Image (tube, rainbow, N blue to C red):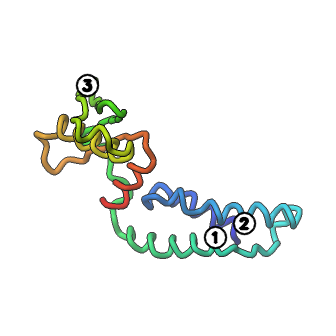
Amino acid sequence: CIASVLGNLTWATTAVPFAQAHFREIQRCYIDSAKKAFYDLKFKCVLSKEARAEIEWWKENSRAVNGKEFANGEPDLSIFSDASLSGWGGVSEGVTARGPWSKEDEGKHINELELMAAFNSIQAFARHLSHAAICIFLDNKTAVCYIVTRV
């Protein structure tokens, strides 16, 4: 039964935003239980507190996307941005934009600088666009998480 659920969740990760991060504990419980039962498909799997929390996440978030577009398609613009302690840079369609940080910005945490680099890159490449789908690529997980939870 849990194998079937995991199969459905794996498929659904393409349709439910951020879903991939929310079935690892369910998988872990399944794998651990399967090993203990010598891979007998009739075994009962007891879900951990963390796995149950992931099931709850799926219940809430699969409802949120019910009836929405399966995929947004290709973005109108893709931008790659990055930050260092001395400046920022961005690339889109082979064109580069970059700049140094102001004295005031130089002392900021790298996570904040990554967000500022993304913002500066979007301004540099998408200023002329309106109602456009923009895909921005960052190499900083904290910055990505911040953006994703606020969009």
138 over 94 or under it: above or below: below
Residue type of the residue flagged with mark 2: Cys
Compared with 110, 57 (above or below) is: below
The total number of labels drawn is 3
In this view, the residue farthest toward the left is: 128
Residue receiving disc 1? 51
Residue type marked 1: Ala
For marks 2 and 3, give the one nearer the viewer: 3
Please indicate whether residue 52 sits to the left or right of residue 139 in the image: right
On-image quarter of the N terminus: bottom right
The spot of residue 38 in percent (x, y) is 89, 62
Q: How far apart are the alpha carbons under marks 2 and 3?
A: 46 Å
Q: Calculate the distance from the C-alpha at mark 3 to the C-alpha at mark 1.
A: 44 Å
Query: Mark 2 packing: few (<14 Cα in 10 Å), some, or many (20+)?
Result: some
The picture places residue 40, in percent across and down from the top left corner, at: 85, 66
* Closest to the observer, 12 or 51: 51
Question: Circle 2 — which element?
Answer: helix
Label 3, secondary structure: give it: strand
